[in-house]
Structure formats: structure tokens, C-alpha cells
Image (spheres, rainbow, N blue to C red):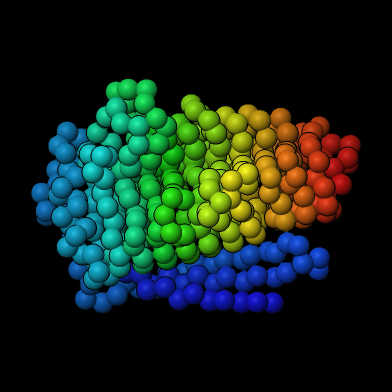
């Protein structure tokens, strides 16, 4: 057993424990991640955005006021607090979070995109930053108010070159592109946790994952993605040879009612290594619950994968996987060539899935 513990200094201390247990075949590995919080650092400032001029009235452009609060606490371990209200954001500018800080939104707080016609934008950006926590609230895109048909990259939360990041209890909905987007065209991000998040009714993806080493998705929901391809709840898709998506654990989450794939791993352009999909409900997706395209040696364990046309779809040499103790109800539990994948203890109609 190989165990690495990363101790991270957030505004609230977050500890990520990474444990890799190699399967006897040495072809697949099970990753276990955990995260825990301790008390907030003493003497770190807390600033309400309303103290810096934000209105939260659903009419005023509050971008500059929120950014002023962010800039003030950056590097201190402090917290920007957004209380109940609708705060309009210029997504061509974005709220840009910085290192060593927390942005905390109350349950009734909403960051809402000011409608535009741009092909690419983000409401919140976490880039070239480390030790950042984003907690609570709702982030709402402009998919119903977008003023053109341009592009598909209007994102809720954009993450790139980011390290030791916790996103917890955030809902990202109605985005022109993805609810959450981990960008590949930057240095590889590391140690990203999404816990208790919801991605709902986004146009392109619930979340895209492109270039990261160490991502935990737990206790979260990715649903109702529809509008423009790939239309997946979760899509792991490095898009260049120098991008690698690796050491990713998706656990205790729901991936439901997305228009195409529930979870799709697309490995034609860059490597995908060590993905564990464990104890999730994957249901009602329009094409396949899980799709593996040109990637293998992953673990799919103890999931309930039901009410999809195909439960698991193998495309273009996706072999060497461990697929164990899953429950299926589709007559097409597996479709395509699973190569050297190990299938064991799965339950499906007529017991034809092992």
C-alpha cells in the first residue's frame, strides 16, 4: 500500500488523504480520498461584500464590489461573505478568486450572469491560485437569456492551474456551457475536491475535467445536462497530448437524466489514468450510463447503473478495467469490446453481465 497525505492550508484547514491500493494484476488501482475541515484560522478577516458596495438586488452590476472584497482578503486566509440576494456578475470580467482565501455564500445568495452574446466566459474563475475554498450558494448562467447562438463555453465555475481547492455545497445551474469546468489549456491542476455540489440544467456538461492530478467528487449531483454535445453529467476529456487527467475518484454521487452520457471518459487526445467510479447512482441518461472511449485500466465498483440505453459502453480499445459489484437493469449491460476487463459479481437481467 502506498499512502500520501497532503496537508493543505486553506482558510479552513483541509486535509486530503490519498491512498493507492494496487490490484493484483497491477493494471488498476483503487484510490481513496478523504477530506475534513478544522476551525477557521484565528485573526483572519471576514468581509461582507455589501460592506464594499454590493447591492444584491438582481439589477446592479456587483462585479467590482465583490472583486474588491476578494482582493482585500486574498493571501490572508480570510473569508469573503456573500449574504442572501441576487448579485449580478459581468461574466466577461468574472469574479476571480485568489490564493489563501474563502468565498462563502449563504443559502439564499446567488451569483447570476449578466446576459451577453459571448462564446466563452465564466461567472467565477479560480486560476493560478492555491488554497482556495468556495462554499455554498447558487451560481446561475444565462442559457435562457444569452443574446446570441455563439459558442458553448459559458461556464459557471472555471478552474485552471489551481491547487488545493475545495468547492462545497455550491449549485451551478442554467449555464450556457458547463456548470463546473476544469480547464486543460494550462499547467496541470492538483488536489481538487467537489463535495456536495449540484450541477443542474447546464447546456454542455455538468462538469468537464481535462488536466488534473487528484480530484475527488463526492456526495454531489450532476443532472439534466442538455443542449449541445457532449451533454454529459461528468466528462473526463483531456484534449491535447500534454494533458493528463489522473487519480480521479467519483463516489456517493448521483449522475442522472443527462441527455447523452452520465459519465464519459474520452481518451483519444490525452491520457486518462486511475479513475475510480464507486457507489454512485447513474440513471436515466439518454445514451449510456458510463462510456469509455480509448481509455482503460479504471475501476467501476458498487454502482447502481439503471434506466440507460446502455449501462457501460466500451469504444475504441477500452480494456483492462475492473468492473465489480455493480447493479444494472438494462438488457445491454455492456456494449462493445471490453478487452481484458475483469467483470465480477455484477447483477443484471438474466445474469448475463459477468
Front residue (pair 93, 331): 93
Quadrant of the frame with the N terminus: bottom right
Residue 125, compared with residue 44, is above or below; it is: above
Q: Can residue 220 be seen from the camera position used here?
A: no
- Report whether 116 appears left or right of 181: left
How many numbered marks, from 0 up? 0
- Report whether 224 appears left or right of 93: right
Residue 28, compared with residue 39, is above or below; it is: above
Which residue is most to the front? Answer: 241
Q: Position of residue 307 (x, y in %)?
A: 69, 32
- Report whether 55 appears left or right of 25: left
Q: Position of residue 201 (x, y in %)?
A: 46, 33
Q: Residue at x 58, y 59 (%)?
A: 246
Residue 304, compared with residue 342, is above or below; it is: above
- Residue 332 figure quarter: top right
- Report whether 110 appears left or right of 69: right
Q: Can residue 291 be seen from the camera position used here?
A: yes
Q: Residue at x 68, y 64 (%)?
A: 30
Q: Position of residue 70 (x, y in %)?
A: 21, 58
Q: Residue at x 17, y 43 (%)?
A: 62
Front residue (pair 326, 207): 207
Residue 291, compared with residue 279, is above or below; it is: above
Q: Position of residue 102 (x, y in %)?
A: 30, 62
Q: Residue at x 28, y 61 (%)?
A: 98
- Residue 203 figure quarter: top left
Amino acid at each position: 500500500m502506498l499512502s500520501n497525505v497532503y496537508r493543505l492550508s486553506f482558510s479552513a484547514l483541509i486535509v486530503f488523504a490519498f491512498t493507492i491500493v494496487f490490484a493484483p494484476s497491477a493494471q488498476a488501482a483503487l484510490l481513496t480520498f478523504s477530506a475534513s475541515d478544522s476551525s477557521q484560522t484565528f485573526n483572519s478577516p471576514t468581509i461582507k461584500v455589501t460592506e464594499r458596495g454590493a447591492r444584491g438586488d438582481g439589477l446592479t452590476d456587483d462585479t467590482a464590489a465583490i472583486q474588491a472584497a476578494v482582493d482585500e482578503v486574498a493571501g490572508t486566509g480570510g473569508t469573503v461573505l456573500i449574504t442572501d440576494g441576487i448579485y449580478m456578475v459581468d461574466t466577461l470580467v468574472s469574479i476571480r478568486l485568489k490564493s489563501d482565501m474563502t468565498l462563502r455564500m449563504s443559502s439564499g445568495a446567488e451569483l447570476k450572469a449578466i446576459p451577453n452574446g459571448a462564446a466563452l466566459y465564466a461567472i467565477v474563475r479560480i486560476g493560478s491560485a492555491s488554497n482556495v475554498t468556495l462554499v455554498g450558494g447558487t451560481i446561475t448562467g444565462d442559457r435562457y437569456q444569452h443574446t446570441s447562438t455563439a459558442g458553448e463555453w459559458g461556464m459557471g465555475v472555471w478552474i485552471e492551474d489551481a491547487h488545493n481547492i475545495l468547492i462545497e455545497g455550491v449549485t451551478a445551474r442554467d449555464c450556457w456551457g458547463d456548470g463546473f469546468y476544469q480547464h486543460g489549456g494550462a499547467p496541470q491542476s492538483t488536489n481538487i475536491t467537489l463535495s456536495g455540489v449540484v450541477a443542474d440544467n447546464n447546456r454542455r456538461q455538468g462538469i468537464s475535467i481535462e488536466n488534473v492530478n487528484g480530484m475527488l467528487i463526492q456526495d454531489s449531483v450532476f443532472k439534466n445536462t442538455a443542449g449541445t454535445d457532449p451533454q454529459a453529467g461528468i466528462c473526463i476529456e483531456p484534449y491535447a497530448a500534454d494533458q493528463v487527467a489522473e487519480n480521479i475518484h467519483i463516489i456517493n454521487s448521483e449522475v442522472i437524466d443527462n441527455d447523452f452520457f452520465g459519465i464519459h471518459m474520452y481518451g483519444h487526445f490525452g491520457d486518462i489514468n486511475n479513475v475510480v467510479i464507486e457507489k454512485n447512482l447513474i440513471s436515466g441518461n439518454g445514451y449510456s450510463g458510463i462510456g469509455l472511449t480509448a481509455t482503460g485500466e479504471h475501476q467501476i465498483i458498487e454502482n447502481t447503473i439503471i434506466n440507460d440505453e446502455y449501462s457501460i459502453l466500451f469504444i475504441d480499445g477500452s480494456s483492462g478495467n475492473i468492473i465489480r459489484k455493480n447493479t444494472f437493469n438494462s438488457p445491454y449491460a455492456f456494449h462493445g469490446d471490453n478487452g481484458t476487463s475483469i467483470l465480477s459479481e455484477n447483477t443484471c437481467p438474466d445474469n448475463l453481465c459477468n
